[in-house]
Image (cartoon, coloured by chain):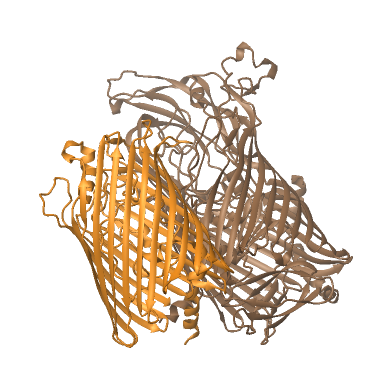
Amino acid sequence: MSAPGVARLTRSFRSAGLAGALIFGPILAAQAHAQESRSARGIPITGVVRDASSGAPLVGAIVRLEEGDHTAVTDSTGSYRLTGALPGPQILLVRRIAYAPHRLPITVPAAGTLTVDVRMPRVALTLEKVVVTADATARAHGELGTASVIGQDAIANQTAASLAQILELVPGVPLSAPGLDGTQQISLRAAPAVFPSGQGTSSLGSFGTLIILDGVPLSNNANLQSAGARSEIGVPTSAGGGIDLRRIPASTIERVEVIRGIPSARYGDLTQGAIVVDTRAGAVRPELLARYDPRTLEVSAVGGRAVGDAQTATLTADVAQTKLAPGVRDDEVTRFDLTLAHRATLRRAPGAADEQAGLVLDSRLEVFRLEQNSPEQPTVRPGATSFNRDHGLRLIERLRLGAADERHLQLSLALDHTTQNSGASQLKSRGALPFTDRLVEGRAIGHYLGGQYRATETLDGVPWLLYGRAESEFRSRRLDFDHRARLGAELRREWNSGPGYQFNIEFPPQTNFNGVNGFDRPRRYDAVPPMATSALYVDDRAVRELGAGVWLEAQAGLRLETLHSGSTWLSGARNAVLQPRLNVQLSPTPWLRLRGGAGRTAKSPSLDQLDPARQYYDVVNVNWYTNDPAGRLAVLTTSIRDPRNRNLGFAISDKRELGVEADLGQTGAALSLVGFSDKLSRGFGVRSLPGFLLREHFQLSDSSTTSGRPPQIIEPASSVDTVPILIDQPANNIALASRGLELTLSTPVLPLVRTKVELQGAYISSEFTFHGLDVGVGTDFGSFQQGITRRLAYWDGFSRVGERALLTTRLVHHEPELGLIVTGTFQHTFHERMHDITTGDTLSFAGYLTRSGELVAVPAASRGDPQYADIRRARVGVLTNPDVRAPDWVFSLQVSKTLPLEGKLSFYAWNAFDRLGTFAGATLAGRLYAPVRFGADVTIPFAALTAWR
Amino acid sequence: MSPLRHALLNRTRFAITIVALVGIMSPGRAQSPLPPDSWVLGNAWMSTWTPLSPIGDLPRRFPAAPPVPGLLVAPAPRMGLFWSAGNPGALAAEVDSAYAGFAVHHVALTGSYHRPLDPTDAGTTDASAAGWRRLGTRGAALGRATMGRSTFDGSTFAVGVDPYTSSPGITTDTITSQVGRSSAALDGALGWQLGGWGMGLTAGYNALDNRSAHSPRARTGRAAQFGGAVGITRALPASLVLGVHGRGLRRVETTVTSANPQTATIYQLAGYDDVPPIDVPLGQQFYRRVQRDGSAATVSLGAHVLGAAITLWGERGVMHEAQTSMQSNNPRGDVWRTRADRTGAAAQRGWRDNRLLVSAKVERLQIDGSGARADLSGTAWLARENQTLVQTEARLVPAGSHWSAAGSFALERRTSSANDYVATLYTDVRSWMPGGAMELAFLFTPRAAVAAGYAMAAYYPLATIPKGETRGPAFQRFLAPELEFYGSRSSPRAFSLTGRLTVNPGTRLLLALRHGSLSPTGSGAPTPFAPSGTRAATDLAIAVTVGR
């Protein structure tokens, strides 16, 4: 959409009445279709829920279909009756306090009534068909796109300290040692490829992977915790990439849905995919989990209870600590998380489930703290410390009006507040250098700084996210299709109110200064304007039977996402993207699905990209250094360049996929094969804008070094020359084209050995392209600025391809009678390769840069001419030969066993064989695995603790 | 009975156990005057089957008194193709009950009478569980798991986990920093019986993480060991049972010593050679990786003769060990190969409904090893070691009496000869160690019982060892004291006190203490390198056991 068009559209949306009509109108309209809607109800499902060991009927068990909101509650005879089930393969979920959640694949017939009796065990490990891996043929709630669904049993069986390790159940995700090591980010459907400059697919991909926690997106857009461009001290931070997943404890997660394919129009601000995480809520059996391994200690507690008939309250708490290099360094990561969940259900008929209540109010309050500390070890690295501390508060209110299986309106409001404190210090040593701390442009007398000092920088950010969404959903039946339509609007405002990047400017975190590029200046984050985005979306999911047992299902949607030019939603549009999305599924038989989808998604830039730090240049005009400090004179001219890019807008991803699924339902056998193509254009990168500064040279009035006083400069300048500079401006100049295949194959349990095999494989190829000027890695731009070289070669863009083929094989041996599950996980990396499309020979340069910042293109035919001999050189960083890593594998072991009083003991060993991997050889790059990591965790129901009193 | 208590009992029967594995990873195994086996949840017979027991190796242990029978803490010894010969195919036939135990253990070691690579003071605390039960009518399962944490004072020169194996290659250093060690182990067995056939498998895994603490030179290490066995048995006429099983074991250990920030000195011992020190300069590290692969095949035969259950077995095992300091693909390294032959017999007979139960076991293990150094060609070392162990035990639980008693006798004959062709040295150590143990238990009330036991042994060596004074500093520091230790007479002693409270039929709470000591007893003139003083170990355990 053109910018003027967007502006017009935005202006028209300023009328709140229109938006209100859009959202609420369908609710009213749906009233008119109530009779028609009722006719759209599908097949009834009935049955009895019983205790697995005693056979007694269970009252109060909640039975529902995973797809959709059809819910029933068992009566005093344990009987239930579900209505509205659509024919075809479905997943039946049964829950009850003190029992293990039951997840049962069923096939709903086209006519008649389906009877499903359920026997619920108290402990999942004793359940005959417990699922401890991701279900690759299931769908995320309300979504038709390709997804992996990870349920509570799989989460409980997975050795995980954070969400990151749970996501290893998704095809194509490499295994990692459990713990809180390193910044943990996830990038869906992207193979690793890293430019010589350091930018890679992982940061771009993780930035574009949407994480939704308890119905509300998490955002890293306002995370500004990165030091200045010239800082020589790094801080551990997730800024510039995706959310640090360490903040989400695995022990408090109920369910994870990873939408790898095309999400519905409901989801925005993403390019790679969406991960929907629900933490535990409702009436949850209270239990305590304790984990110990030589590096990580974790204790978590979860519990929820009903308060009266209409309310439930749940508390989850988690404390974990990982020592990063015990015995060598004292670095550690500590996490604390506390979540309070409250649900009030009003206007509910007696015996009805929450989903059938007329009004449901969900409240969540989350407090978390994530700290990474590298304290000073005076005997090892004196003066060197670093830390990164995030602590936050998140408040979510969700209100649903109307019964879930009819029509309803859902309002979500969230406030996410994080305080981020990062910092680092190091001992620095430098020679005497002319220095100015001027904060505005102009010329000033400077002074000299030198010697050894302790440089300390702090980054104090306070990101905020204000989020709101209104969504109405209603059902209808038209053209023989059962429709479930959603219409919604979403508002986001993000800002940072922290004092920002601070350091003592006299003792800056850098020692390099070439007489042009100055020292960083402190930067206040609260001076960065907030960003506001809004979105409107409509989505319809329709299903109909085409013939005998042949079903067609489609989900189509349209999303308009707007990045506003100002800090409020009432301001004009800076950029807007219309995002059509479509998923289609044809089921010729109940067990076979042919699937396809296409759609566009978009991701907004971060606050730092919208408003980057100003770039300071301190050009030395006079550098008169004498032994006598009183005789020194430094004159510097400060220039400030604003790298903001007014045209910076959304990154856009065009996604396609085709797939086939065979799901044999209760046998547990399933096959899913998906081919995909994601083309990210206008990705966020940095472009170098050439320019120049004028440097004045002055004559001095007294050039004696023994006068005991500084000389005076003689105005005007005796000469002026130009100094080339490159301004680093955020730009939509990255492209990432990924394509690949994802395979999931689950066998039924082989009865003789009671073992199930699950294969998850992915081949992904990502072409990562940077468009724009590149002066090359390792180029001494400082020498060019100082005039030592008169011109500098440049190249046009860079393109690198990363490929990876991973196959993860899980052998799950289950002894329900013993309550024992042994899971062996082999991950085989068959193929990992990086190669460049860009050539790097001496004739690959595109032209040269002059000292006045001009780009002079050199035709390819002329690049061999003698006059270009000074700029002809091989491009550093270009791979002459592909970077191929040796195929290798790693194995992990997990053993879970029931304990008395429904507890559970798990043992795990990551890289259990302590395989080293492969060292780099003559033709292959190395692949070294982290050492064996082992530990155990114990889950104890609180009932067990009280039983011993 | 409350539903929770009922659930506890039911579940406990299903639960896995542990504890003999404590011996695998605690300092009590090779550095203690107490017997190496686990105690509270069972004696050595509970661990024979484990696929994690060494193949082709005869670890050099401390002289120790025979185990006190443990009348109150463990079921009576069991014998058979599974329990004695380790054939998992016999599991289903030999497990006829349910048993489970949970224990928390603390072992403390102290005393200067030890080898150079042993710590003076060490402690281990661990939590463990073990159990077995039948699965339906044709199957049985057994499992154990333990997790522990050990601390070693700054007196040991050992970089690796277990420096006193048969291998001549040992990495040592002069850091002597405090070390913390976390460990975990689990093993289990599943067996089925189909007509006259039995089949089964065992699998085991343990891992260790070693890290120095409060040291200016970092010593880190880790080890992982995994093993498995598959076996079948066949019932033959005349109550004979023939069994065959194969077992594989792999162990990898990696140690890294870093100059962080102070420099370190490493001695990479190679047999009896007087190796030069290796200096690790600032910012660098010394790396050593040891990989040991073993496999063994066993034939076993069971029979019932004159009311006694008799088991015979013979095993051939081979082991290959490679050590290297190169961090590269296909690194060169030192090699140690062994061939091991193990033969044994066990018998058990009960009278009066097993109120008098007599058990006896004889086992002989012989190891022939040869080694080569990476820096030399040809054979550098040859060694032959053998151990013959005779153990008998009688336990009496008279009907209607509050008293019960048990006694045991053990005799160990061990010879060890090694020839180092590089150092041109030869050693030969032959020893006898007779010992006995006695335990009395008294039932105060139907629910409360106590037991006291005492054990002693005498270690008589005859050693031909090099004169340390004529060797270099590395030999004098690391090797001579060890050889002198094995060449010195000593006398281990141990006593035990146990209290047992029966919470309900089948569920027992135990508090157990045992203490052992070792001191030299020789009357000759002390040699300059021989260690002196005493060595003591105290073992305190609290446990819950369920079942028979």
Q: What is the display colour for chain A?
A: brown
Look at the image and tell me in which quarter the C terminus of chain A lies: bottom left
Q: State which quadrant residue A664 falls in.
A: bottom right
Q: Residue at x 49, y 37 (%)?
A: A919
Q: Position of residue B135 (x, y in %)?
A: 55, 72
In the rendered structure, the answer to whether residue B521 lies left or right of residue B355 reads left
Q: Is residue A258 above or below residue B349?
A: above
Q: Is residue A742 above or below residue A74?
A: above
Q: Nearer the viewer, residue B318 or A223?
A: B318
Chain colored orange: B
Q: Residue at x 55, y 27 (%)?
A: A876
Residue furthest top in the image: A866
In the rendered structure, the answer to whether residue B26 lies left or right of residue A853 reads left
Q: Position of residue B187 (x, y in %)?
A: 46, 61
Q: Nearer the viewer, residue A333 or A772?
A: A333
Q: Nearer the viewer, residue A27 or B83?
A: B83
Q: State which quadrant residue B405 falls in.
A: bottom left
Q: Is residue B346 visible?
A: yes
Q: State which quadrant residue B368 falls in.
A: top left
Total number of numbered discs in the rendering? 0
Q: Is residue A329 visible?
A: no
